[in-house]
Structure formats: C-alpha cells, structure tokens
Image (cartoon, rainbow, N blue to C red):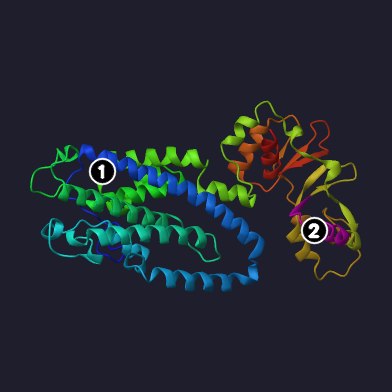
Amino acid sequence: MNPFRTGKLVMFQATYDRDWHFFETLFFVILGVFGGVFGGLCIRLHLRVAAWRRRHVKAESAVMEAAILALGTTAVTYANVYTRADMGELLSYLLQECPSSTGSGGGGGWGGMCDPANAGRVIVGLLAATAIRAVGTVVAYGCRVPCGIFVPSMAIGASFGRMLGTVAQHLHRTHPKWALFAQCAPDTPCITPATYAFLGAAAAMCGVTKVTVAVVVIMYELTGALNFIVPTMIVVMVARVIGDAIVEGGISEQLILLNGLPFLGEDEDECLLDTQAAAIMRPANELLVMPMSLSLLELRQVLDASAEFRGFPVVDSHMRLVGYVLRDAIVKAVMAYEGAEVSFGAGGPGLSLAHLVNPSPSTVRPRTAAETVVEIFRKLGPRVVLVASEEDGTLAGLLTRKDILRHTRMH
C-alpha cells in the first residue's frame, strides 16, 4: 500500500532514535505558548481580513483576488529557502531527524539544517519562514480557492519548533556543562530538533482549531511517532489554555458566527432550559402561507414578495396546517404554465401542485420544550419546524435554526 506516493503508510513518517529528556519540558511549554499565541492572533486577524473581504471583494473579483494572492505570495516566499518549498515537502524535511553522521558535525542536510556551522543562519531563516507563513495564512485563508488550515498551521508550527530545537541544540553544544543539560550524556547528541518541529506543528494546529485530543491522534496518524505522547499532551494543553485566553472558540466556530451560519452547538442547550417553542417561534400572522387554491397572479405576487423564503406552509381555509412546500419546486412547476388557477390539493381547480407538498413536515406543539426542537434540528436536519395548535391543528408559527440562535444570543 502506498497511499501518499511516498512508499510509506503515513504522510510524514518520522523515526526518532533519541528519547526526550525531562529538562526539555521547558522548551515544550514555550512551544505550547507559541501555538496558543499564534492561534489566538491568527483567528483575531483573520476575522478582520474576512470581514474586509466580505465588504470589498465581490464574487466577480474572485479570479483577480486569487491571481494577486498567488503573485504576492510567490514573490515573497521565493526569497526564503524554507518557504520556497511546498508545505508538504517542507514538513517532511522539518520532521526528519538528521543522520547520525551529521547530527554532531559535518553535512548540511536540506537548507543546511544539519550543519552546526549554519546554526545562526538556520535560526534566522526558520524564524523568517514562520513569520512569512503566518502572515500568508491569515491573508490567503478564506479566499475563493479551495484550501485548508491544517497543513498551513502545521507548517508554521513546525518551522518555529525546528528553530527552537536548533536554538536548544546550539546551546547544548556551546554550553554542555550547564545544569540545564545535566541529564545529557557527555560527548553525544542530546537534543533532536526534528522532535521540536513535530511538537510545534501540534501546538500551532491546536491553537488555530482549539482541538485537543483529535490533534494528538492526527499527529500520530501523520507521522507514526508514538513515543512522544506526553510532550504532545503538554504542548497541546498549554496551547489550548493560552489560545482560549486570547479568543474563545477555534477559527471554524468564529467564522460560523461571523457569517451567521445557523449552526447549533452545545452552548444553546443551557440557554433553552424551561423554554417552550411558543416563546421562540415566529407567529403565524407574520408568515407568508399558501392557501389550498389561488390564482396564478396571486401566486406570482407571493413569490415576488418573498424572495428570501425557501418554502411556505400550506393551510386550508380554516388555517389548519396541510403541509409544507418548497419555493424552488413551485417556481419550476409554474414557469411555463399559462392557466389561471393553481391548487395545492388533489383534485383542485387548475394546475394541481399537490405532489409538491410535503404532507408530514416536522411539527411540534406550542408547549413543546425548546430542547426537543433543537434535537429535531440536529438529528433530523429539517429546514424548518412548524408549530401547530394542539386543539384543531391550526398553524401557530414556524421555527428555524436562526430563530433559536437569535433567542440564545439575546439571553
């Protein structure tokens, strides 16, 4: 099996000969702090970029925006050897341990990372690569080109982690007698910068997404490095605490709020205790409903006046609920119709649209608990939930996800 065209079962397979030492916990905490700070600032800055993009970048300018971003990022990243490479290629190099023959002297490796004489240049280059990737991710993420946030955040964290690992390794080489390095065996390599890149990638991903356990699992699925579970847990926990102190929720949750998407999370349950559907619904007198039969002119007037609605409750002459019909289905059915009457009941006059009506839409009673309505939306996924009276089945109101979110935001 060769799923990634690399001859390996995992994307960035890494094998580390040396285990970690307790004193390295200090550097692991630094990686966690970086991941949390980077994630929090990335989210805050990207929200501003996304808000600006919504106001000023129109849909017809999508190609131009992508071309400008491609030209700008190419011009900036080409100057640095660590940003010139593809992110996947960069990660594969950053996560690889230096060969034993070059780990303590001689040999340059990719970008000179394994040559002790190049430590200063490597540190500066990786730090610059971290800053360049961070700015590019904030600006480019969310444009109309399919792209994700996992690999960019991992590349940023891996660059910083490899830089910090190189700093720690250089300190050990120049000051091996420090008390900090008392656990290290004399005259042997003690610190593996590649492991710092691995942990930095986990910290940055956690800081941006605010995911903890899944990040640990993802890192092991990608690399197969199973002996660093404790350091990974340390950096992820620190990154999550620091990131939450800067901004609540990951980048996906924040974009959901910014774009007003009707996503029902777990926070809504606490705000809906002892609340009934009648307190949240839009009452029937504020809704546009479809009678069982009407003229084609009246139907087109209703459609023209309700472009923002996706569907309509269908009621009889006594306002009893009959069903629910989608707007797009009505438009397609009457597009070429030239008659005078339209009916939503079987056997009615004119064009019969009874086959378009859903006779059993998701329906609750006015006194139904709001938590039950939320469960209906989560598990059944309807666009709307209709509210019908218990006495005679007349339409009392209508509920959408946005109605529930509006109520929870107000309370």
Q: Amino acid at mark 1?
A: Phe
Q: Nearer the viewer, residue 382 or 357?
A: 382
**Helix, strand, or loop for circle 1?**
helix
Expressed as whole percent of the image width and height from the top left, the position of residue 37 reads 44, 45
Say how many tags the image has: 2
Expressed as whole percent of the image width and height from the top left, the position of residue 265 reads 57, 40
Where is 278 relative to 42, above or below?
Answer: above
Q: Determine which of the numbered discs, if any, sits on residue 290 in the image.
A: none
Expressed as whole percent of the image width and height from the top left, the position of residue 127 reads 34, 57
Residue that appears at 14% across and 38% down: 182
Q: Residues within 10 Å of mark 1 (few under 14, many from 20)?
A: some
Instruction: Find disc 1 in the rendering and name its residue.
Output: 228
Pick whichever of labels 2 and 1 is earlier in the sequence.
1
Residue farthest to the top, as pictured: 274
Where is 45 relative to 184, above or below?
Answer: below
Q: Over which residues does the magenta segment extend?
A: 299-312
Question: Which quadrant holds the N terminus?
Answer: bottom left
Q: Nearer the viewer, residue 307 or 132?
A: 132
**Helix, strand, or loop for circle 2?**
loop
Q: Determine which of the numbered discs, if any, sits on residue 353 in the image.
A: 2
Q: Amino acid at mark 2?
A: Leu
Residue 300 inside the magenta-drawn segment: yes
25 relative position to 207: left or right: left
Residue that appears at 20% across and 48% down: 171
| Marks 2 and 1, how far apart at CA | 64 Å
Inspect this view and state whether residue 208 appears.
Answer: no
Residue that appears at 67% across and 44% down: 401
Residue farthest to the left, as pictured: 187
Q: Nearer the viewer, residue 384 or 88?
A: 88
Question: Which quadrant holds the C terminus?
Answer: top right
Pointers 2 and 1 in contact (C-beta within 8 Å) = no
